[in-house]
Amino acid sequence: MFKKLLRILALGIALIGVYQYLQNPQQDTRPSRPASQETVPSQLPPQPAPASVPAQVPGFGVKHPRDFDEAKGILRKIYPRGVEIYCGCPYDLERKDRIYTAACGYKGQGARSKRIEWEHVVPASVFGQRFAEWKNGHPSCENRGKNAKGRNCARATSDVFARMEADLYNLLPSLGELNGARSNYPFGGIGGEPREFGRCDFEVQHRVAEPRKEIRGDLARIYFYMDARYPGFEIVHRRNEGLLNAWDRDDPMDDNERQRVRRIAEIQGNSFFIGRLSRLATASE
């Protein structure tokens, strides 16, 4: 009788175990894996941009120049001859940066007066200072024990900055001396028309640069393009918007400008006619 009771008890315990398993079949009674042994995902989530860079910076197509050096190489090949922007001097890069100063009345001095450079219409500092690498530096930019910062550091460590700096629409040929004189100053009006560079209608005073009338609309539209292409950088703002609108209105787009932006669109792969410039797209087809 005692052995029979033991068998009944053992059967009852087994039935209870089966019932519990059926109630929770997915339960894993194995010990959990230590945190240090967890599998790392094959694709990490994208890292956020530096806090100072607007989150809506667009992507770049495969045709877009990777950096300023590549952009300059492209421009020298597609525009070996032309007219530089600030004085209207004809140039021929195939003749060792030959500049025909007699045709424009330019008088300059120094080595930069004898060469063509590629001017950022919207200065690199206007958008560059929004990058943490420009403002604060980066460990990979250390120079002689000090954390370097500024344009070179941003160019070396930020793909977004490097490609913004290389945007072909924002680059125009300029006499090197005038490129240096303009620096990163905003455009504006200067009274009295002081002529520092011969008959060249280009003045710089009190940290303001005034270009000749024939090019002002082109410059304004480049500002509009950059503002639409790179939203959040405040390239067009309340302090310059009125002036740029007036320059755009008083100096409409001509055939030379249309040809230039058409050519760049073919090379760089994105349209110039975005934002407020969309109104010009049909007339430029």
Image (cartoon, grey):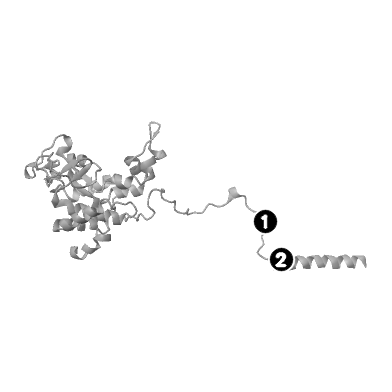
Left or right of 138? Residue 102 is left
For label 2, count other residues whose C-alpha is less than 10 Å away and answer few (under 14), some (14-19) or many (20+).
few
Task: Classify residue 177 by image quadrant.
Answer: top left
Q: Which residue is mark 1?
A: 30
Question: Where residue 52 sits in the image (x, y, percent)?
Answer: 39, 48
Residue placed most toward the observer, 80 or 245: 245
Q: Which residue is mark 2?
A: 21
Task: Classify residue 225 by image quadrant.
Answer: bottom left
Helix or strand or loop: what does disc 2 sit on? helix
**Quadrant of the drawing holding the C terminus:** bottom left
Question: Where residue 176 sits in the image (x, y, percent)?
Answer: 18, 40
**Residue visible at 31% across and 52% down in the picture:** 234
Given the current orientation, which residue lies at the most extreme left position?
102
Left or right of 241? Residue 22 is right
**Quadrant of the drawing holding the N terminus:** bottom right
Question: Where residue 150 sits in the image (x, y, percent)?
Answer: 34, 40
For label 1, count other residues whose C-alpha is less than 10 Å away and answer few (under 14), some (14-19) or many (20+).
few
Q: Which residue type does callout 2 highlight? A: Tyr
| Gap in angstroms between the C-alphas marked 2 and 1 | 15 Å
Q: Does residue 237 lie above or below 182 as drawn?
A: below
- Closer to the chain start, of discs 2 and 1, is 2
Left or right of 248? Residue 128 is right
**Residue visible at 73% across and 66% down in the picture:** 20
Helix or strand or loop: what does disc 1 sit on? loop
Question: Where residue 246 sits in the image (x, y, percent)?
Answer: 19, 55
